[in-house]
Image (spheres, coloured by chain):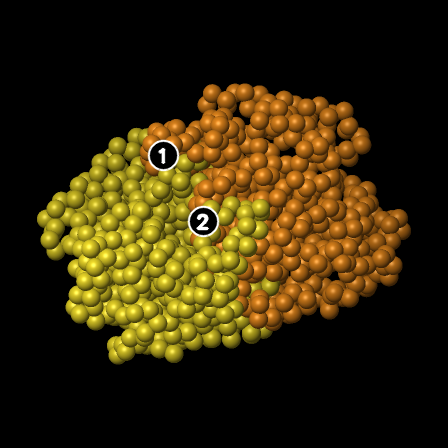
Chain colours: A orange, B yellow
Amino acid sequence: IRFLLSINKLSQHVQNTRHYFAPGIRPQHTASSPAHGDDVYQQPLVKTEIPGPKTKQLSDRTSSMQNTGALAFFCDFERSKANYLVDGDENIILDCFQQISSMPLGYNNKELLDLCKTPAFQSTVLNRPALGIFPGTDFPQLIQDTLLKVAPPGLNQAVTMACGSCANENAYKVVFMWYMKNQRGEELPLPDDEAFTTCMKNQIPGSPKLSILSFDGAFHGRTLGTLSTTHSKPIHKLDIPAFDWPIAPFPKLKYPLEEHESENTKEEARCLAAVEELITEWSKRAPVAGIVVEPIQAEGGDNHASDDFFRKLREIALKHNVAFVVDEVQTGVAITGKWWAHEHWGLETPPDIVTFAKKMFIGACIHQLVLHNSQGYRIYNTWMGDPSKLLFLEKTIDIINSRDLVSAAETTGDYLIKSLKDLEKAQPGLLSSSRGRGMFTATNVRDPGARDKVVKHMLSQGVLVGACGTESIRFRPSLLFTPTHVDIAMDRLNQGLNSVK
Amino acid sequence: IRFLLSINKLSQHVQNTRHYFAPGIRPQHTASSPAHGDDVYQQPLVKTEIPGPKTKQLSDRTSSMQNTGALAFFCDFERSKANYLVDGDENIILDCFQQISSMPLGYNNKELLDLCKTPAFQSTVLNRPALGIFPGTDFPQLIQDTLLKVAPPGLNQAVTMACGSCANENAYKVVFMWYMKNQRGEELPLPDDEAFTTCMKNQIPGSPKLSILSFDGAFHGRTLGTLSTTHSKPIHKLDIPAFDWPIAPFPKLKYPLEEHESENTKEEARCLAAVEELITEWSKRAPVAGIVVEPIQAEGGDNHASDDFFRKLREIALKHNVAFVVDEVQTGVAITGKWWAHEHWGLETPPDIVTFAKKMFIGACIHQLVLHNSQGYRIYNTWMGDPSKLLFLEKTIDIINSRDLVSAAETTGDYLIKSLKDLEKAQPGLLSSSRGRGMFTATNVRDPGARDKVVKHMLSQGVLVGACGTESIRFRPSLLFTPTHVDIAMDRLNQGLNSVK
């Protein structure tokens, strides 16, 4: 009976939405598809179980050299293309996760591959300089054509780094320096000041007691400073010393939003009030120099808040003279339907700092001129990132702009979220809280165990999605993802849900 | 009279050492030169002041986008070759600093450039994976042919990261996890343990009060965790919150060593005693889980200690059950005449962890199996470095081995240190404390002001060296550096010293 019910539900659903189809049958999708032609593969093709025998062999070998606890499978990158990832066992997988959201144009984009063949690229990637002291002659133009080209208005200072954690670590340092400059009324104390000697011993006043306020459920990185602002999962934080910094509640919105408007508004007000209370409470202990927030908490479970929440949070930062740091490591680069997710908010005053990495190829923080410091070596390290990544970014920006992939992300995202909501209705009790901005979407499965089984089942049918939070599935496709790909993903999600009924 | 004296001294010196010569005249050096033929430039050629007009123009432009306080000059990397760096004003500069010690084979090595032209390299650099979850099928072999090929005996676990700071941050995390596992007697507490909930709030016991012991004058990075173990210069640390961790004195040796043997032995004993006292003192406050030390304190001023000091330090770590972390970010990769500088010490028990970056192309920590943890996502981030850097490293290891550049570094280093000591005698009162291991050498100029002038003068004559500490000049040449290059550098150093007489 249960089986028949399932069939019946799916059948109704197919009639209702016409998005679902048997594996191997390609839907006749007619929506505009700016990325059509990027794929060389038209659909997933699974030959073995995943992980397959070759991955298992390689995994056994790797486990003698390093922790393989997170390892999913090995990839054949030379054979992968656009939205399709080919694994070491020749399975062709529709990749809706894209190396944890870090591939804007999928695999082996032809124009980027052509770039790799140029002498300029080869010279840049081989002769990686110490960018803060001996940059290449093309560096200023490159910064202008990449980071500053896409920087939010008002943010015109760019600090490059090698990864997202370092982008945030340095953003925090910029914030602390700015805060202490405001306290002193000048950039540096005199060299004979107590601050100069005490900082060498990690003691106040040179190493001041200051804090960054972060949110429950946030993820900002795994180095000791950023980890003190990360509160996603115990396994990330256990056993690691942390700074005693304030942690505010992040709104837990109820879905569907339209049915819980007043509850959600109260919830956001509660969290904003807590932020202000914490700023006051910490002012004696370790004053809050900055607030850091993700536009959508990704690792923590794709937790959203309203635009109004973020506008008010920005106002609180201004009111208390605290820097407002927006971490766009995962939300950046067009996937939400705007280049930066925070552009949706309609802020009157831009963020003080925006940080990013992943789809930007390079880690960096860009900030307002007011946070600039003029002494060398204060924000610095040997490499300060890798300029060859800026060459990838330069070309990627051109491609995204010329193909209008920002709008495409919005269009495909609308279709994706509508498809998820349709599937919610078709699978009541199994799927809920579908939410998203552009293609940056997620949905909740009944419980953590069922979520894990659905993700696994989808992979066995050739579709890779990410997991986040305790029971969410997240979609982080490339910008070449189209409604056609959405249909395939929804079909496999539906199959996965059926498998846990 | 002063001028005549200078001339006289130089003239005596030339007679004594026969290493010095007028600019533009090439010495007829006959020492064996394994790297002969790498250079396309035979000597420095300076056309403009340095920084020249083009650099100044680019620098003005850059200063509107970022801090240029540390910027020296812009480089034309495509025209640079091996030991010679060409700047944006077409000056040909003998580079004894190599992008802060990060270029093992100098600029545009032909074999590495050829590597950039291969499809395998291009696929790897473009499709940068999330290495901890979706590595390429070639990854296990690559780790074996790179990091584990040069790993010290006993260290067989490799964690890749994007830079030196992240290598150290993660080494500290490995140490903390190992320490807490020892405390508990098992890897993880049960999920309902207090540690699981408290760590999410940055509170004990989940976020334990533990510390890393570091040394005065040390440099281990600039992220908040590593910066808490960095004590080189106030400008690196000022205004940044720090962990209250113990800091031990590092030996201040007197030179020449042979004249201060008993004093130096006492000094090292004093520092070792302080280490033990700090471990005991901190046991109640924030137990020392690890000791981190550079084989030669680089940024702090090229401060050496004896092999005996390090052997005893390692014994102290064993005695107190504290992890022994050796930071080889700057000292690694053959420049000291062994692959790792700590190989000189003759340890009975290898370090628990060795960290590196710079000339290894990738940041990483390699550690003993006993520090391994088996859960996924504890030591992790999205990229975990960049496997294309391992391809550079693989080829570089082959080149270094096939040309025996480790021995060459020792031979050239002996010649460099002898030349520096000769120059000390020729420039008494101006130059002192020449010290080094292989080509990893430094010398002290009379005072900080004079040091800065000498470095500047040398650059104006086409030789780039680094500064470190308050009054030291450091040599961090590529492994292709030969006695011929030493002669050129010594000539310019001598000229620089004359300029501050």
Q: Residue furthest right?
A: A15
In this image, B326 relative to B199: left or right? left
> Mark 2 is on which residue type?
Ala
Q: Residue B254 at x, y = what percent?
A: 17, 49
In this image, B431 relative to A352: left or right? left
C-alpha separation, residue under disc 2 versus residue under disc 1: 19 Å
Return the residue at label 1.
Answer: A191
Asked whether residue A133 is in view, the answer is yes
In this image, B473 relative to A348: left or right? left
Kind of element beneath mark 2? loop
**Chain holding disc 1:** A
**Chain holding disc 2:** B
Q: Residue B292 at x, y = what percent?
A: 32, 47
Q: Residue B164 at x, y = what percent?
A: 42, 52
Residue shown at 49%/66% (left/top)? B90
> Dot 2: within a 10 Å radius of its alpha carbon, few (fewer than 14), some, or many (20 or more) residues?
some
Residue shown at 16%/68% (left/top)? B16
